[in-house]
Amino acid sequence: MEAKAELVTHAGGCHCKRVRWKVRAPAKVVCWDCNCSICLMRQNLHFIVPSSQFELGEDSELWLTLYTFETHQAKHLFCKVCGICSFYTPRSNPDGRAVTVRCVDPGTIGIQEIKTFDGQNWEQSYAETNIAAITK
């Protein structure tokens, strides 16, 4: 059985730095490259953690605005000032946070692997990838 990677604290946030957060995750993360309509347009490469490993910075919530579409299960949170979506609650893992890897401050994070999620065929990809198990 493979040992779990030790977690480290990564800091990050949006471009204007009004939205800040900390996330506990391995130093090298498994990222997801999704081709759903929103991830494709913003070239979102993200990793997923349980909500308990994500901490939003003080006053950051004041600067967030919510966007949902279609099933309204994914909760995309954008900075009201700079427009960056540095994290969101994914439809696949409503008990987790998807963190945009490029929004992590440099120096603590690397990419171990990039997996593909076929968001254009969401239900099939959800079943095939077992992505929901990430936050269990």
Image: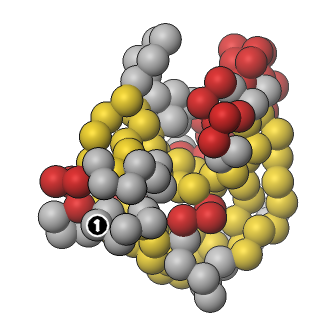
**Position of residue 59 measured from the top left corner of the image (x, y, whole percent):** 16, 64
**Position of residue 80 measured from the top left corner of the image (x, y, whole percent):** 29, 48
User: What is the quadrant of the N terminus in the image?
Assistant: bottom right
Q: Residue at x 37, y 42 (%)?
A: 77
The answer to whether 102 appears left or right of 63 in the picture is right
Amino acid type of the residue tagged 1 in the rendering:
Arg
The answer to whether 8 appears left or right of 59 in the picture is right
Closest to the observer, 59 or 89: 59
Identify the residue position indicated by label 1 in the image: 18
**Position of residue 55 measured from the top left corner of the image (x, y, whole percent):** 32, 64
When the figure is inspected, residue 7 is found, relative to residue 73, above or below; the finding is below
Residue 109 visible, this angle: yes
Closest to the observer, 39 or 94: 39
Q: Residue at x 46, y 72 (%)?
A: 12
Residue 4's quadrant in the figure? bottom right
Q: Which residue is drawn at 69% across and 51% down?
A: 45
SS class, disc 1: loop
Residue 95's quadrant in the figure? top left
Q: Which residue is drawn at 64% across and 52% down?
A: 46
